[in-house]
Amino acid sequence: MDNIYKSVTIEKTKKIALIAHDGKKPELLSWVEKNKEILQGHFLCGTGTTGRLIQEKTGLPVEIYQSGPLGGDQQIGARIVDGKIHMMIFLWDPLEAQPHDPDIKALLRIATVYDIPVANNLATADFILHSKFMDQEYVHWIEDYEKQAQNRAEAFKK
């Protein structure tokens, strides 16, 4: 592909972030329980209460970060940037104002920049989880922002 893009491989074992706002936690817990057999073959992480509830209710291991309003959304975003999270199931509540809305938007933006699959509802989560790509490596191309920054810096030197 063009030199402003780079190839990124999502491994066969996916690293999945599970996040839900308070009103959506029961939905996510039920979905995880229903899909436990598939999810147990992948690395799971989640923010604060959501991660703890999934661990307690399903017995699945979950790496737990801070609660979203306390920096958990930013922690997840940083791991997306580092390639340590491959996909995200984020059931956010579109009808409830969130005090950390800028963090939520930043997390969704970074997921888009790094071109990871994101589900914001259970139908999309089902489509992603039951995709043929869940059982194999997936190679995709993302913009190489580091290279673009380097090219801009070199252009300023001239």
Image: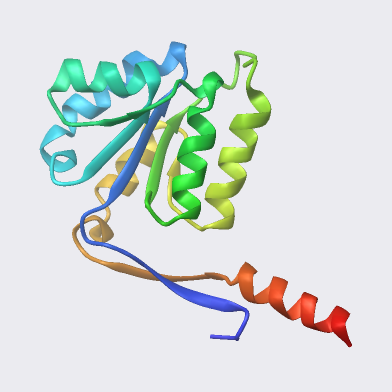
Relative image position of residue 114 (x, y in whole percent) = 52, 57
The residue positioned 27% from the left and 46% from the top of the image is: 129
Relative image position of residue 150 (x, y in whole percent) = 70, 76
Q: How many numbered markers are drawn? A: 0
The residue positioned 56% from the left and 52% from the top of the image is: 112
Residue extending farthest to the front is: 157
**Compared with residue 151, is residue 52 higher up or lower down, i.e. above or below?**
above
Front one among 28 and 15: 15
Colour pattern of the rendering: rainbow
The residue positioned 45% from the left and 12% from the top of the image is: 22
The residue positioned 30% from the left and 40% from the top of the image is: 126
**Compared with residue 109, is residue 105 higher up or lower down, i.e. above or below?**
above
Left/right placement of residue 62 relative to residue 98 reads: left
Left/right placement of residue 69 relative to residue 137 reads: right
Relative image position of residue 67 (x, y in whole percent) = 45, 20
Q: Quadrant of residue 12?
A: bottom left
Relative image position of residue 113 (x, y in whole percent) = 59, 56
**Compared with residue 107, is residue 138 higher up or lower down, i.e. above or below?**
below
Q: Quadrant of the C terminus?
A: bottom right
Front one among 103 and 36: 103
